Image (tube, grey):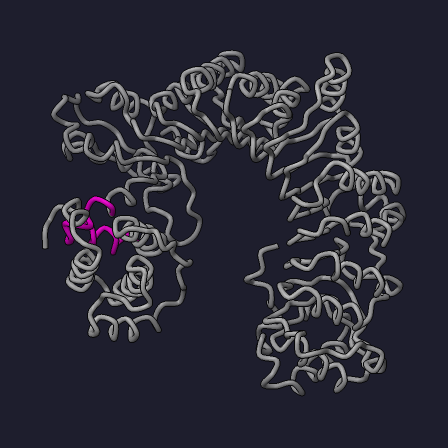
Amino acid sequence: MEGNWQALRGKSCQRRLRDVERLLLAGALSPWTCARIAYVHHEVAKAVAGTRQSHLSAAFCERVKDLRHSCHRTPSPTHRALVVAEIVATICQFLQEDDGESLAALARTCCALRTPALEVLWGRLKNLIPIFRLLPPDAWAFHVDEITSRRVYRLERDLVPEDFTTMAKYTPLVKTIGFNRRGDGWPSYEYDVLPAGPTQIMAQCFPQPILFPALRTLDWPRTFCTATAHHLQNPHDACEDFWACACLCIGPKLKNVVIDVSVHCRHVLEKDWNAQLMNFMTRVGTEFPQLAEMDVDVTTEWGSSGILPFATEWLSSLVCRIPRLEVLRCGTVPLDGTALAHLGCSSTLKELCVLLTRDTVDSYTAISLDSGVRARFAALRALDIRTKDLAVFNDLADGNVMFPQVEAFNIEFISCPSGSDVDAFFNVLHDHFSPSRLQRLTVNTDAWSDSWSSNTVLSRACALRPLHVRRLLAFHELRQVDFNARWSVNLNDGIAEAMSQAWPHVETLRLSPQRGHWEEDEVTSTLRSLHALATNCPRLIHLDIPFQADGANMHLLPPRTKQNHPLKRLGLQWVLIDEHVSEVAALLGEIVPNISINASCLRDDEQESRWLAVKSERTPALTGSTDAELDTPFNDWDW
């Protein structure tokens, strides 16, 4: 087998597949890793060859059949146009998620896979410590902090150009710093500390002008900390040169910056600290016009109260200077009206998450009236609004704002709205969003807000009524409708049937009050609602609408035909079953063979026993959940 991976490109498809076959079978990897690699490669090899029959040997195919049963997760379908190099890159990325050690072994033992494996291993770093450890062993050391038990690194001697020979091979591979992988696979160095001093010395002594020439994403506040014991306990405390060190990492290909403005230094005056941050963001905005994505966050109460006015000023100024911004997430830092108007006229902005305040809306409205500017957000595909009051968003919509291309809209608000605000909100949805584009609609409220608890009567009056739902029936492309708001919900069979006919592609339908239980007078829908949704919405998976499973009225339901295929699976909440258990079980087994019900939503022991009786009568037809799963039936649900 040739050691150079590039040599594989000159061979025919069949020869390349056989070469990769020998590579995969010869590697000294664990059976678990071999099983996953073999399964992935066997499936994509057929796509690359363009035929139903793979060019791999019969013995290898038999081994794949034996090994594939040990794979707990199936990779996503692969495009037919992929070449072998892309296949191997996909395999390496697949391995890194759960088996980084095997991927490192793959890089050490297989010459042909060394380059793609190293690109994946070094492509995403939590912080700069792996790069720092590439210095000669005698150049650095660490001690363990007595309070936090974290390793704190330091330099032991002056650095010379020869010390960077190994480092120079790997720094061009780094594309992301600060990527949070979440889960058991977190790198062991995540909580170690590299102080500012060694960081600056390393960057200044590096023989090349740019430390990370291929860096695309920098999540700096989550990758850097100081070495003092007090700062180790508070990740939001930083050193005097915090933002100066951030400047050392940026490069010509930087496209995404993540900034947490809660980070501060108690040893630096606020005006000096703000000047450092401004200098960093000014460099990002002026020297890197290709910047396309920016996340700005505030994660502490200190930041919310002390730095927000300044953050609003520099963030708004920066937004107006970036020519081709595609993604902006600033759900905790408000913009001013000028920046909002600028974003509304952008031809590149595709995703926006913004904190909407009354001052922002008033400022934008004044600008719009004076200049005649109309924010159309022509390229926007995803909109996420965070606001205290629903009326603020309604007033923004009245100020010449349109969202003609938005496909996903999410809004979160805190205070309890009036009934007129709810009516106006649904009018805004109907008038300012495109019925042919909107696919995902989510409304959330803060369940623990004091305003909700002190306005129980008012929130009861803020009802989601059939009139509101009918305003949404024109949106025929909806896939997800999720209203997790603390409103009263008033539904009936008629509106449920209308929803089933208007939204044939819906997958998630959740119209739920954000409190413990539904009121008795709210549960007015019957099995007609479930029957209509199961008949007209073949993709439905998640359903959270209350209904009475009234077996006594089964004869009133329209008959099902052969064209009415049962749903593959469905999860339900808020189902009240009457005493006609056998009739309900028969219908559920016919329309939804695989069904689960959230037992925590059942009102009492009688309802729970009725559901278990329904399930036992349909065994083995009702195979969607075991008795144990009834306690937690929605672990895999993505609300």
State whether residue 455 is above or below residue 276.
below
Q: How many marks?
A: 0
Q: Position of residue 166 (x, y in %)?
A: 16, 33
Front-most of residues 468 and 158: 468
Front-most of residues 419 and 605: 419
The quadrant of the picture occupied by the N terminus is bottom left
User: Which residue lies at the image location 77% right of the left edge and 52% below the top edge?
Assistant: 473
Q: Main secondary structure of the magenta part?
A: helix
In the figure, is residue 319 to the left or right of 475? left
User: Which residue lies at the image location 37% right of the left edge and 40% below the top edge?
Assistant: 191
Residue 102 belongs to the span the image colors magenta: yes
Q: Position of residue 234 (x, y in %)?
A: 47, 33
Residue 605 belongs to the span the image colors magenta: no
User: Which residue lies at the image location 63% right of the left edge and 43% below the top edge?
Assistant: 407
- Whether residue 362 can be seen here: yes
In the figure, is residue 354 to the left or right of 397? left
In the figure, is residue 270 to the left or right of 468? left
Front-most of residues 454 and 592: 592
State whether residue 45 is above or below residue 168.
below
Q: Position of residue 29 (x, y in %)?
A: 21, 61
- Whether residue 451 can be seen here: no
Residue 377 in which image quadrant: top right
Q: Position of residue 332 (x, y in %)?
A: 61, 31
The quadrant of the picture occupied by the C terminus is bottom right
Task: Single out the residue that lies furthest toward the left.
Answer: 2
Question: Where does the magenta region start and end?
Answer: 100-116
